[in-house]
Amino acid sequence: MPYCIFGIKILRNMKIKIIIFIISFIIFIAGYREYNLLFNSKDKITFLNVGQGDSSLITSKRGHRIIVDCGPNSKITDQLESKLGFWARRIDMIIITHGDKDHYGGCRDIIEKYKVGKVMINGVFDSKNQDYKSLLELIQAKEIQILPSIKDTYITLGDSIELHLLNPQNNLWEQDIRDDNSESIVMLLRSAKNSILLTGDADEATEGKILSQYPQLDVNILKAGHHGSKTSTSDKLLDAITPQQVIISAGANNSYNHPHPDIINKIKKRNIRIQEVKNYMTGIDILL
Ligand SMILES: [Zn+2]
């Protein structure tokens, strides 16, 4: 039976070769993806899927990385890995729009995993919020520079993306304020292709103040304030900035019932496209 034994041997060799080929192919594809994520960065903002909360990642083709809010928990690190790759370990700046957990909760995980250059905050501190206080202490312990947000500051990413700070209106450094939604850092992201208003949890009154100061705001994409809650996205704002698209970041089946049906209706009534982050597993990518 030597012939038969020989046949089995060939078959076994073929199987080993196929397995080696498949493993090599998988390693090549994974390596190629990681290489692209690490070295072929794009001018892009991604509204990350962090559940009930807010987080967006802005990257530039020159490799800049800015995170606006960190979502409520450690889920953010999986989202970042899907966008930046397994080996990425640097974030240039985190901007925490205000001191609510659904915006700062995941910052600790980011700071533990990545080397973070700077953190910008609105300056408000709530003496009852020990959790936020301990995050700020961690940031200081890691010797990360903390910057106050100052209205009309411009943050530039390369030569084609800029963030213009529109709110808070006043210097709030170390003011003890319990509910600081209205003092959220609000920014206008401008690039060659888009003009995107990032609102944090700013309420209608804050929207009104911004409009009175910047009546000519040119916006084509609006991130709905406060997760599409009824407190934000006023008729006045929609009529003034006339966006073509609204992004809503709220968790599926969340207990706050965000977004509010009235907000959805007023957006639809104006024939504006709505995209909800919860419907996209790794967030909504917009090229800048
Ligand atoms: Zn919020």
Image (cartoon, rainbow, N blue to C red):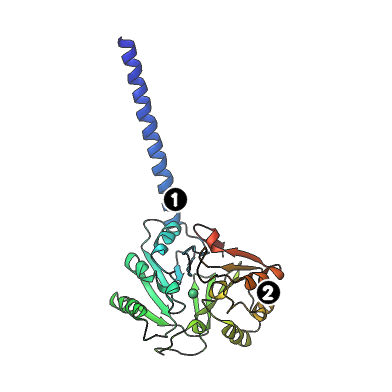
Q: Residues within 10 Å of mark 1 (few under 14, many from 20)?
A: some
* Residue positioned most to the top: 1
Residue for badge 1? 33
Check contact, mark 2 vs mark 1: CB within 8 A: no
Q: Position of residue 50 (x, y in %)?
A: 46, 64
- Marking on residue 52: none
Q: Closer to the camera, 148 or 174?
A: 174
Q: Is residue 12 left or right of residue 72?
A: left
Vertical order, 75 against 1 (above or below): below
Residue shown at 34%/19% (left/top)? 8
The residue type indicated by label 2 comes to Thr
Relative vertical location of residue 30 with respect to residue 250 in this rendering, above or below: above
Q: Nearer the viewer, residue 258 or 217?
A: 258
Q: Where the C terminus falls, by quadrant?
A: bottom right
Q: Which mark is residue 242?
A: 2
Q: Quadrant of residue 126?
A: bottom left
Q: Measured from the top left, where is residue 244 in percent x and y?
A: 66, 68
Which sits in the foreground, 3 or 204? 204
| Circle 2 crowding by C-alpha within 10 Å: few under 14, some 14–19, many from 20 | some
